[in-house]
Amino acid sequence: MSEHHDHACMARALLLAKRGIYTTDPNPRVGCVIASASGEAIVGEGWHERTGGPHAERMALDAAGSSARGATAYVTLEPCCHHGRTSPCTDALIKAGIARVVFAGEDPNPDVSGGGARQLIAAGIKVEGGVMSASAEALNIGYITRRRSGRPYVRSKIAASLDGRTALDNGVSQWITGSAARADVQRLRARSSAVLTGIGTILHDDPSLNVRDTSLKEVCQPIRVIADSQLRTPVEARVLKLSGSVWIYCIEAQLPEKLLAAGAEVEAVAADGQRISLPALLDSLGDRQINELLVEAGPVLNGALMSAGLIDELIVYSASHILGSGARGMFDGPVLESMDQRIDLKLVDLRRIGDDCRLTYRKLP
């Protein structure tokens, strides 16, 4: 097979994998393409549709049938070699008579992590990794981050005026951005494992934090997480009136009977003074298999996360208006005394969303 053909087939597999972007959590999004032995035709395709369902390789093998013998399988992640909810995909590939496996990136899951490739090689199958690995990692950035660090990938979303203001001094913030930007946020929520906010936002804005865009089909609603050190969340809060899970994190083991009766799960983590230790919060979320965490909060929580270097990606929806110096900013933090104390970020994407601009930044290595 030519390098061009390998990339074309892997690109197709990545497109298939994206079909599971809203439904596979906490599993990775994976696609598979099977090309005939001659390389002239695609004989099978599949993708991981949802947790507990067949993996991409098995879907593609079922579609290929006997044509899989002697064929090449293109997979966006190293095939699994362990028993989980399903049996190993390596066994299925070997049994089907696949002659060559090309995968994009190694699975950092310690139960796999190179073991899948080794098992295939031991069975006489030619194996090549690293084809379009950057694109594959971007698709599964949350899963990969959690497997490598034990914490979710933290993505903070902020809607701001042109002068960097997120609300008027009286707290009014609806609406800074237009309908197109708000629809884009719905897609961010839909791909996230959980949405994190602070108690200040709960008390001032009473947000829903769920996915309400009916055009997004088969969405797994993100878990709604509240950082509430003193358990001030009112039982009448909108997040507690909606279906789905709500996790409230505090700093002392308490028995908040009313919140528990309202359906919330309450967990105490280590304290940082009078506030929750944010590293401890992220560790807990990682332990609970949260891959992508979307932060929708005010300047206090965003400032604390940014100052601690815990925001991996910052998405700013910048609107074309001015709110003035009396309005609220994006981040609360210490007063800087020199320019070398500033937090530098890398702009990785800039695009127009309706009448607004979306700027995506990532922290520097």
Image (cartoon, rainbow, N blue to C red):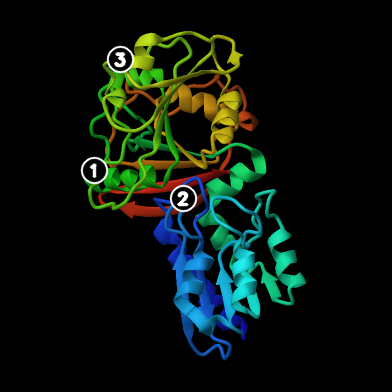
Q: Position of residue 312 (x, y in %)?
A: 55, 40
Q: Is residue 146 above or below residue 273?
A: below
**Residue 296 seen from this side:** yes
Residue at screen point 31% across, 23% down: 240
Q: Is residue 123 above or below residue 233?
A: below
**Which quadrant does the N terminus fall into?**
bottom right
Residue 260 shown left or right of residue 12 in the figure: left
Q: Which residue is mark 2?
A: 51
Q: Which residue is mark 1?
A: 178
Q: Amino acid at mark 3?
A: Val
Residue at screen point 51% across, 90% down: 40
Q: Which mark is residue 58?
A: none
Q: Amino acid at mark 2?
A: Thr
Q: Is residue 332 above or below residue 176?
A: above
Residue at screen point 22% across, 45% down: 179
Q: Nearest the camera: 327 or 301?
A: 301
Q: Amino acid at mark 1?
A: Gly
**Which quadrant does the C terminus fall into?**
top right
Q: Position of residue 288 (x, y in %)?
A: 54, 34
Q: Position of residue 59 (x, y in %)?
A: 47, 68
Q: Is residue 218 above or below residue 324?
A: below
Q: Which mark is residue 235?
A: 3
Q: Position of residue 112 (x, y in %)?
A: 68, 55
